[in-house]
Image: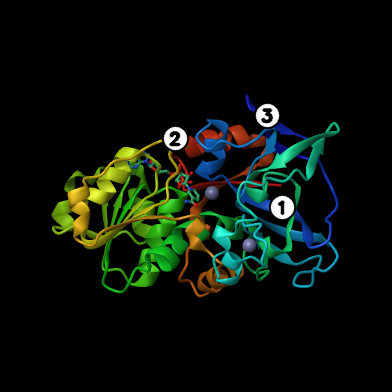
Amino acid sequence: MRGVVFDGKRTQVVDDLEIRDPGPGEVQVAISAAGLCHSDLSVVDGTIPFPVPVVLGHEGAGVVEAVGAGVGHVRPGDHVALSTLANCGTCAECDRGRPTMCRKAIGMPRQPFTRGGRPLYQFASNSAFAERTVVKAVQVVRIPKDIPLPSAALIGCGVLTGVGAVLNRARVDRGDTVLVIGTGGIGLNVLQGARIAGALKIVAVDANPAKEAVARRFGATHFLTSTEAVKDILPTGADHAFECVGRVELIRQAIDLLDRHGQAVLLGVPPATAEASFLVSSMYLDKSILGCRYGSSRPQRDIALYADLYREGRLLLDELVTRTYPVEDFEKAAQDAEGGRVARAVLTF
Ligand SMILES: NC(=O)c1ccc[n+]([C@@H]2O[C@H](COP(=O)([O-])OP(=O)(O)OC[C@H]3O[C@@H](n4cnc5c(N)ncnc54)[C@H](O)[C@@H]3O)[C@@H](O)[C@H]2O)c1
Ligand SMILES: [Zn+2]
Ligand SMILES: [Zn+2]
């Protein structure tokens, strides 16, 4: 079968991947569509270290093909969106509703694929850039069949991360002010999360002026191409500032632009050894810096919620899918994503 493989040097679309059958507690899914998140590109450029060879992709939706022993919540033919959390479901973190913190799931990549007899790693416990993948049952969430699968695919990272960061981590409240730095697939979902939460002023900043229309469509009340003029719109600073690019100088700007009691939420992923600095004295006014993994999501609850909000017209998904590409055109999709020409590039199988 076809898939996108990174071998440590180059990325190629291959057609001789094999996947093992689902074992107990696992589900095999035929991927229909998968979004290209910046994190996939960060594996290729080394920003996110990951063992190779690896099958990329982690934002997908498709149709259940087979279930292993003990799986009862989905059956073959169901439409599903996939999460990246292969959490165990039984540890203390899982039990308290923090599957993103499961100690049995982070840093333990699996190898369900083979190519010419050699095993390949599964990126983000997911590998949605393959015709088929095998994931844990806990990662598979049934969605209504009337949601187009290219749109549903984007729930699995962009929406869970961006909207989740607003609702679960920052807990933005009605009337709050929000600053969003970077309006790619993640930032746009922070914008619509802030709109859903009832934020008053939502200021979007993106270096690419072409992002203005889509940022406003997703909820931005103001758009700027740098943070310089943010204080003209929010004179006392922002209640919540989200960094959605992954650059330490932007993290510093997010912190410097906080109002009293404000919080900076770090979503972007800089290189693994990057350090950032801030003025300690600026923090005394009850300010906070929050890390956020995957929107602090609980996928079974949150994916179902986002599917419902989409069907009510309150959460935008179709508008994120600027363009679809057959998987063979991965390079073109990556170039369009890097060049800022798309909200999300979506590969189809
Ligand atoms: N925390 C998490 O769980 C999580 C999950 C998914 C993605 N991420 C990370 O989030 C980041 C964003 O991902 P994405 O898929 O939205 O990326 P993207 O490439 O779609 O968007 C990045 C945006 O940042 C803008 N940008 C670049 N430099 C800028 C600057 N100096 N000032 C303002 N804007 C600038 C670009 O124009 C683009 O619109 C990445 O670092 C990714 O790895 C984190
Ligand atoms: Zn992602
Ligand atoms: Zn666990």
Q: Residues within 10 Å of mark 2 (few under 14, many from 20)?
A: few
Mark 1 CB near ligand 2 (8 Å cut): no
Residue 163: quarter of image:
bottom left
Left or right of 128 on screen, residue 19: right
Task: Please tell me whether mark 3 sits on a helix, a strand or a loop.
Answer: loop
For the point 47% across and 67% down, the residue is 315
Viewport quadrant of the N terminus: top right
Left or right of 202 on screen, residue 348: right
For the point 76% across and 69% down, the residue is 74
Q: Which mark is residue 273?
A: 2
In the orientation shown, which residue stands out farthest toward the top? Answer: 9
Q: Position of residue 261 (x, y in %)?
A: 23, 64
Labels 2 and 3 touching (C-beta < 8 A): no
Tag 3 residue? 7
Q: Which mark is residue 31?
A: 1
Q: Hey, what amino acid is under mark 2? A: Thr
Left or right of 101 on screen, residue 76: right
Labels 3 and 1 touching (C-beta < 8 A): no
Give the total of numbered labels: 3
Q: Nearer the viewer, mark 2 or mark 3?
A: 2
Q: Hey, what amino acid is under mark 1? A: Ile
